[in-house]
């Protein structure tokens, strides 16, 4: 089934030195459970597309639908993971992960159960009471992923999430993300400029090119990869 339908997206930023055309006629249909990498050089519009899907940015034209309903802003159905983590610095690991459900009408015991489950999934149970500044980059990104999972998002949006990590940590997080995707059957849209990363992670690679940003190729990866 189709979970996300992007159609006819155009985006023009009004910058101080004039208009910038960031996206032209972008269409994208995502099926539930796909792991899509949006791949392209810097400046081709990947982040813009992801932010419009997240609802953080308005398109100039076109529409984004989740399960057939047009979205006009952010919602808990779409969770975002940023390169710079964007954790709440005044909250512990546990509180960061439980933030979403504790601010909806979820019973406190249920919030604790969800938090424990996803904290364990990303291997941070022993760090429950630490604050973000006490964690390594990899650990912070694990918290950010668990926070999206605990909030019961259907679609995990990731904008170069491992770009600020060292190579070893990045490799560990890539493996963990594949495991999480397989366990949860989440739909993932992952922005990267790395061909290696896209081919490693995705089961579908969507290649964008610039001036103006558009989708050039849309390739299903059929070869068995190392994780298979
Ligand atoms: P990518 O994520 O592929 O690097 P972006 O979506 O960040 O690409 O940017 C696409 C284009 O839009 C670039 O030319 C960039 O300079 C421009 N752009 C992005 N954000 C803004 C903004 N807030 N204001 C003006 N121009 C922007
Ligand atoms: P990661 O691979 O998660 O980025 P590092 O390579 O920085 O983590 O650290 C490896 C291990 O060291 C972590 O799994 C954790 O057990 C421990 N560690 C890292 N940072 C801290 C910290 N600030 N406080 C306590 N232990 C830490």
Image (spheres, grey):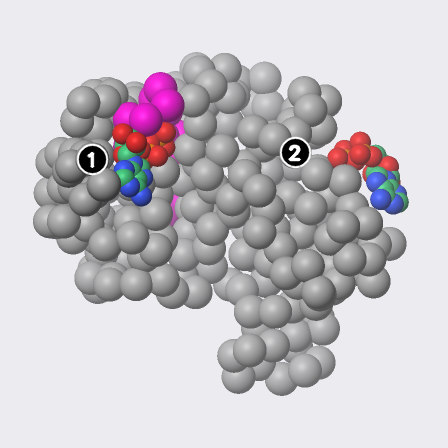
Which quadrant of the rendered structure holds the C terminus? Answer: top right
- Split into quadrants, the picture shows ligand 1 in the one at top left
Residue hosting label 2: 173
Is residue 5 among what the camera can see?
yes
User: Which residue appears farthest toward the front when viewing the image?
Assistant: 17
User: Which residue appears farthest toward the right when viewing the image?
Assistant: 126
The magenta stretch is 32-45
Taken as a whole, is the magenta stretch helix, strand or loop? loop
- For image coordinates 54% across by 39% down, the residue present is 83
24 with respect to 34 (left or right): left
- The correct choice, above or below, for 123 with respect to 25 in the image is below
- For image coordinates 34% across by 43% down, the residue present is 50
Residue hosting label 1: 17
120 with respect to 107 (left or right): right
Residue 34 lies, in percent from the top left, at 39, 39
Quick one: 112 or 20, which is closer to the camera? 20
The quadrant holding residue 41 is top left
The quadrant holding residue 215 is top left
Residue 175 falls inside the magenta stretch: no
Residue 40 falls inside the magenta stretch: yes
Pointer 2 residue Cβ closer than 8 Å to ligand 2: yes
19 with respect to 74 (left or right): left
């Amino acid at each position: 089934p189709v979970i996300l339908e992007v159609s006819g997206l155009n985006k023009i930023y009004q910058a101080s030195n004039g208009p910038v055309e960031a996206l032209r006629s972008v269409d994208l249909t995502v099926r539930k459970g796909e792991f899509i990498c949006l791949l392209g050089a810097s400046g081709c519009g990947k982040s813009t597309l992801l932010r419009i899907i997240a609802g953080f940015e308005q398109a100039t034209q076109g529409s984004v639908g989740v399960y057939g309903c047009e979205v006009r802003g952010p919602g808990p159905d779409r969770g975002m993971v940023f390169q710079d983590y964007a954790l709440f610095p005044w909250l512990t690991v546990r509180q960061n992960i439980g933030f979403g459900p504790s601010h909806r009408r979820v019973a406190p015991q249920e919030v604790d159960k969800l938090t424990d489950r996803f904290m364990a999934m990303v291997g941070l149970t022993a760090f429950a009471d630490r604050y973000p500044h006490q964690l390594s980059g990899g650990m912070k990104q694990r918290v950010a992923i668990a926070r999206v999972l605990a909030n019961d998002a259907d679609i995990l949006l990731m904008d170069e999430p491992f770009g600020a990590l060292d190579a070893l940590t990045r490799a560990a997080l890539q493996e963990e993300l594949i495991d999480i995707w397989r366990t949860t059957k989440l739909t993932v849209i992952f922005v990267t400029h790395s061909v290696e990363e896209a081919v490693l992670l995705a089961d579908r690679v969507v290649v964008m090119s610039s001036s103006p940003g558009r989708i050039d190729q849309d390739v299903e990866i059929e070869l068995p990869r190392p994780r298979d």
